[in-house]
Image (spheres, helix red, strand yellow):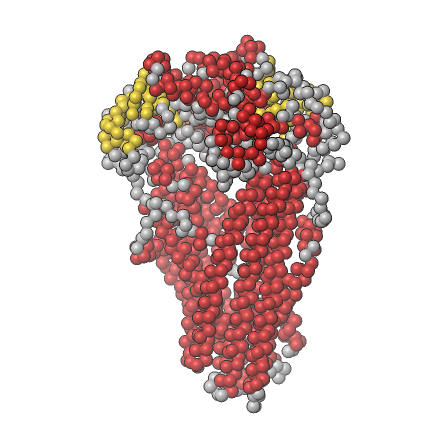
Amino acid sequence: MGVAEFILPQTFEPDRRTPLRWLLSHTRRYWWLVIITLIGALGNAGLAAAVPIFVGQAFNLMLTESPDLQHLGTIAIWIVASQLIRGVLQLGRNFGAELIGQKLERNIREELYVSLLGKSMTFHNLQPVGDTMARATNDVREINLMFNPGLNLVLGSGNFMIMPLLLAPQYHPSLILIPALFLIGYVLAIWQYLHELRPISDSVRRAFGQLNAHLAEAIDGIEVVKGTAQEQAEVARFTLNAQSFRNAFVHQGDVEARYLPLLLLGLAEAGAFLHALLLYQAGFLDIGQVIAFVGLIQLFGFPTFVSLFAYSQVSLGMAGARRILDLIKRKSELNRNPSGAHLQISGEIEFQEVDFAYQEDDLALEGISIRIEPGQTVAIVGQTGTGKTTLVKLLNRTYDVTNGQVRVDGVDVRQWDLEALRQQISIIEQDIFLFSRTIAENIAFGHPQASQVEIESAAKAAQAHEFILSFKDGYETIIGERGVTLSGGQRQRLALARAFLTDPRILILDDSTSSIDSATEDQIQRAIFRAAEGRTTLIITHRLSQIRWADKIIVMRKGCIAASGSHDELMSSSEAYQRIFTHYEGG
Amino acid sequence: MGFFRGLDAEAYDRSYRDRDLAQRMLAYFRPYRHRLLIAVLAILVIAAAGALSPIFVSRSIDLMVARGMEDYLILFSAILFTIGVIVWGANWVRRRLITRSVGDVMLALRRDAFVASADHDLSFYDEFASGRVVSRITSDTQEFAQVIVLVTDLFTQLFQAIILLVVLIRINTRLMLWVLSMLPAIFAIALGFRRIARKVTRRGFRAMANVNSAIKEAVTGIAIAKNFRQEASIFEAFARVNKSSYQANVRRGFVLALVFPTLNALAGVGTAILVYIGGLSNAAGIVTAGAWYLFIISLDRFWFPMLNLSAFWTQVQNGLSAAERVFALIDAESKVVQRDRLRVPALKGQIEFDKLDFHYKPGEPVLQRFDLHIRAGENLALVGHTGAGKSTLAKLISRFYEYQGGELRIDGHDIRTFDLRQYRSQLGIVPQTPFLFSGTVMDNIRYAKPETGEDEIERIARQIGGGEWFETLSEGLLTEAGERGNRLSMGIRQMVSLMRVLVQQPAIFILDEATASIDPFTEYQIQQALGLILKDSTSILIAHRLSTVRASDRIIVLQDGQIIEEGDHEALMTADGHYAELYSTYFRHQSLEYVEQAAGFATPEDTT
C-alpha cells in the first residue's frame, strides 16, 4: 500500500466507487437544499397549473345567469396570490440548485486539489499541467452547471410534464389520454434527437477546432508564409477548413430543423382540443373545464423549448465528473517508505545497470552504469530527448527504475525514507517556477524560517542580490502576473539562492538558459560554480565552460551513455567531443 | 459575451457610415436572396398560423356558449391539426434555408478576411496581436452571420404580435389598452434585469479570471512544493482562492435565479387583471366569452416579443460592430506598395541601398540616407546593439516594410517593380525564432517548395552528419512537429528551418540568428548546415554567435542606423573600436579563452 504524500485531516469521506455515487455522496451533505429545490420545483409547476384552473372557474362563474362579481374579484386575487407564491417557490428551486452547484464546485475542486497534492512526483511529471488545469477549472465548472441550469431545468420541466397528467383526469378520467401520449412521444423523440445530434455536434466542434488551430498557426507564422511566398497555399488550406466547417454547421442545422417535439406539441394541442370538445358535447365537461384542460396542455410548451440544452448540460457534467474522479483515483505508485534510511547524505551516487521506461517496452534509458564520488561535479551533455533529464530524476525518485539500481551512499534510493532523501536532494528545473509572492518568500520557500540576513547572503552567493536591489521594492518585490517579470537568467539565480538556503547534499541543475551578453553569463557561471562547491552536483548543461571544468562528463545518446570521463580523457577518446571544442577555433 | 467586445479597438478600426455598412452587409447576403425570400414567406406562415390558433379556440368558445359547436367540431379540429403541422413544416423550411445562408455568408466572409490578412505586410502584424486577428476571422464573422437568425426570430414574433394586436383592437379597444398599458412596465423590468445581470456577470467573470490564474499557479506549483515538502503552505493559498470564487459566484447566482420568478409573478398579476376586467366586460355584454379568453391567452404572446426586444437591440449592435471589425480587417491598407509586377529573373544576389530613408513611426527615423553595397555571393554579418538597425536592413530586403526615400536595388532593379511572390521565392529567410507548422518534419523542410520529392529531402537532410540529427527523432523525417513545432527541441527546429533554405536554394539568404542555447552537438551540426547555405548564396547574417561572425566575409558594425566600422574580425579587433566593445559585451563568453578562464570563477572572493 502506498501512502499519499499529503493528507489533510478531513471530516468528509466521499464514496468514490462510481461517478454517480460520488456525486450523490457529495450532494447528500446538502440534503436540506435538495429538499428546498424539490419542493420549489413541484410547487412551481403546480401553481403554474393553477392559472388555467382559476381561469376556467372564472368562465364558469361568468356564464351563470347572474354572476357574482365579488367572487370574480376573489378569483383574480387568488391568481395574483398563487403566482406570487409561485415566484417564491421558483426562486427556491433556482437558488437551491444554484447553491448545490456552487458548493459542489468548491468542495470537489478542493478534494481534487488535496488528492493532487498527495500524489507522487512521478504522477505530476507525467501528467501535463494543462490537462490538470482543465479538470480543476472547466470540468469542475461543468459539474456546477450540471446542477444549475442542467438538473434544475430537467427537474422543472419534468414537473411541468407531470402536472397535466395528474390534474387533467379530475375533469374526466379519459383526459389522461393526450398527456400520456405526448409524454411517451416526447421521451422517444428527445432520445432519438439527442442520439442523432451528438456525433454531428462533435464534428462541428472538431471542424471549428481545426479551422481555428490552423488559422492561428498560419497567422503566427505569417513571416514564414510570406517569406516563402506560400500565401496561396495557405489560403487554399484555410478555405478547405472553412468549407468543411460550413458543411458540418449546415448538417447540424438540418437536424435541428427537424426537431420533432415541436410537431408533437402542435398535435397534442389540437388533439386535446378535439378530445375536450367531444366530452363537452357528450355533457361530461362544462366550458370552464374545457378551458382549464386546454390551458393545462399548454404547460408542455416549457419542456418542449427549454429542456433540450439542459440534457446536454447534464451529460457534460457527468463526463466532467468521470474525468475528475478518474484523476483522483489514479494510483500514485510511489511509496514514501517512512521507516527507511534516514541519514545525512555524503553524496556518493551509483547507477548500476539501470533501465527505465515511461511506457512498457519503450526504454528511455538503457544499461546505465556510472559512479560519482561525493563532492564531484558532473556535466551531463547530449541532444534534447536523449534521456538526460530522466536520468537525474531517478535520483530523488521522481521516477523509479524499471531494472537495475540507483544507490545514494551505497543504499538503494527505494530503501531511503523519501522525505529524508528529497530534503537532501535539490532539483533546479529547466523551467523555473516562481510563486506570485515576494522575492524573499520565493527564496525562502524551502526554508520558511530563514531570516532576512540568511536570505540576502544566499542571494549574494547566487549573484542575485544586485538585480534584486535594482527593483523598487527590493526583496519585497512581488513576482508574476501582477508583479515584475524576470528573465530566464534571473529566475535561475533565484532558484540557486533557494538552493543555497536549503543547502542540499546533492544538487541537480537543469541549465539550459543562454545569456545574450557576457556580463550576465559571468554572473550565472559564478553562481553555478559557487553552488557546486562542497556538494555533489549534476549539471545538465550546454555551456562549454561547465563541461570543460567538470570532474566528470557524461555524454548521452539515445538513452545510453555514449562516453564518459574527464575532459582530457574525452578529448583523446571521443571524436564528437573533440569537434565541439575545436570548431570554435577555426570558424 | 457580446458586451466584452468593443473594448479592444485597434488602430486600423474605422467607423463606417451606417448606409455603407448596410450595403456592404447586404452584398454578402445578396447571392442568397431567393433563399431568404422563401424563408421570409415561411416566417409569415408561422406567424399567421401562430396567431390563428388562439383565434380559432376563442371562436369555438363562443360557439360552445351558443350551443352551436356541433357543426364546426370536425372543421375546427382539422384546422388546428393542420396549423400544428404547418407550423412545424414552415419552421423546418425556415431553419434549413437560414442555416445554409448563415453557413455560406460565414464562409465567404472568412475567406475574404483571411485572404486580406495573408496580404497585409508585416508592419500590420507588428502592430496588431495575431490572436486578435484570428478572433476577427473566426468569432466576429460568426457573430455577424448570426444577426440574420436574430432578425428572423424577432420578426416571427413581432408579426404574430401585430396580427393579434389588430384582431384584439377590433374586438375591443378598451380591453386592449389595458394589455398595452402593461407593456412599458414589462419592458422596463426586462431591461433593468439585463443591466443588473450584465453587471454581476461581468463581476463574476472577473472573479473567475482571477481564480483561474490562481488555480493555474496552485496546480503548476505542486511539483515545486513537493520538492521542498511545502504542500501545506500552498494548500492554504489554494483554499483562500477557492473560497473567494465561491462567494462571488453565489452572489451572481442569486441575481440570475431571481429573474424568471419575478417575471412569472408579474405575468400572474397581468393575467389576474385581464380575468377581472375581462369578466366585468363580459358581464356588461361588451365582449363575448371567447374574446375574453383570447385576451387572456394573448398576454403571453405579447410578452415574449417584448422580452426579446429588450435583448434584441444590443445583440444586433454586437453583430453590426462585429461586421465593422471584419471589414476594417479586410480594408486595412497595405503600406508596401509595388509600382509594377515585373517578372523576376534568376537573381545573382547583388543588393544596393542607395540613400535610403526609413522609419517605423513618423518622426523617429531609423535609417537616413543609408548607403550599402552587397556584392553577389558575399556573406555579410551585421552586428550592433539592439535597435542599431540590423533587422531593419534584413526586413527591407525581404520587402516586408516600405521605405520612405532613396532606392533599394536588387541586381540593379528597383525592388518596387518586382512581382513580390516571385521575388520572395528567391529569398531564404530564417527568423530568430524558427517557426514550424503542424505536420511532419519532412513537410516542414519542403514548405517553400512543396513539390520536392521525399528522396530529395532525405538526400539534403543527410548532408549534415550523415543524417544523425533526424535519426534520433522517434519517426525520423516523418516525426510530427506538433503545433508551432512544439514537439521538437529548439535545436531541431533550427535545423529544420535551415534545411528549408537548403531545399529552396535561394539567391539571397537572410538569417536572424537564434539566441536560444543549444546543446553543443546540435550546435555543431547547425554550423555545418549554415556553412552549406553560405557557400551558394548572398547572405545577410544578423549574427549572435561568434562562429557565424567569423565565418562571414565582411562585418558591418551598425550604430543608430549608421555604418560606423566594417572589415573582418581580425582587422576590427585590432582597430579596437566599437566592434571590440561589442565583442566583449556579446561574444567574449563564447570564445575558448573564456571557457579556459572559467575555472577561476569558483573562488569565493568574487562575491562581495
Q: Position of residue B582 (x, y in %)?
A: 38, 21
Q: Is residue B527 left or right of residue B225?
A: left
Closest to the observer, B311 or A376: A376
Closest to the observer, A68 or B358: B358
Q: Is residue A276 left or right of residue B173?
A: right
Q: Is residue B580 visible?
A: yes
Closest to the observer, A135 or B203: B203
Q: Answer above or below: position of A4 versus A430.
A: below
The residue most toward the bottom is: A66
The residue most toward the top is: A572
Q: Position of residue B541 (x, y in %)?
A: 37, 23
Q: How many marks?
A: 0
Q: Quadrant of the N terminus of chain A?
A: top right
Q: Position of residue A344 (x, y in %)?
A: 70, 24
Q: Answer above or below: position of B259 versus B29.
A: below
Q: Quadrant of the C terminus of chain A?
A: top left
Q: Is residue B504 left or right of residue B356?
A: right
Residue at the image point whose x is 61% and y is 54% from the top: A102
Residue at the image point whose x is 35% and y is 12% from the top: B574
Q: Which image quadrant is residue A155 in?
A: bottom right
Q: Is residue B43 visible?
A: no
Closest to the observer, A378 or A301: A378
Residue at the image point whose x is 72% and y is 29% from the top: A417
Q: Position of residue A478 (x, y in %)?
A: 52, 38
Q: Answer above or below: position of A402 versus B209.
A: above
Residue at the image point whose x is 59% and y is 77% from the top: A78
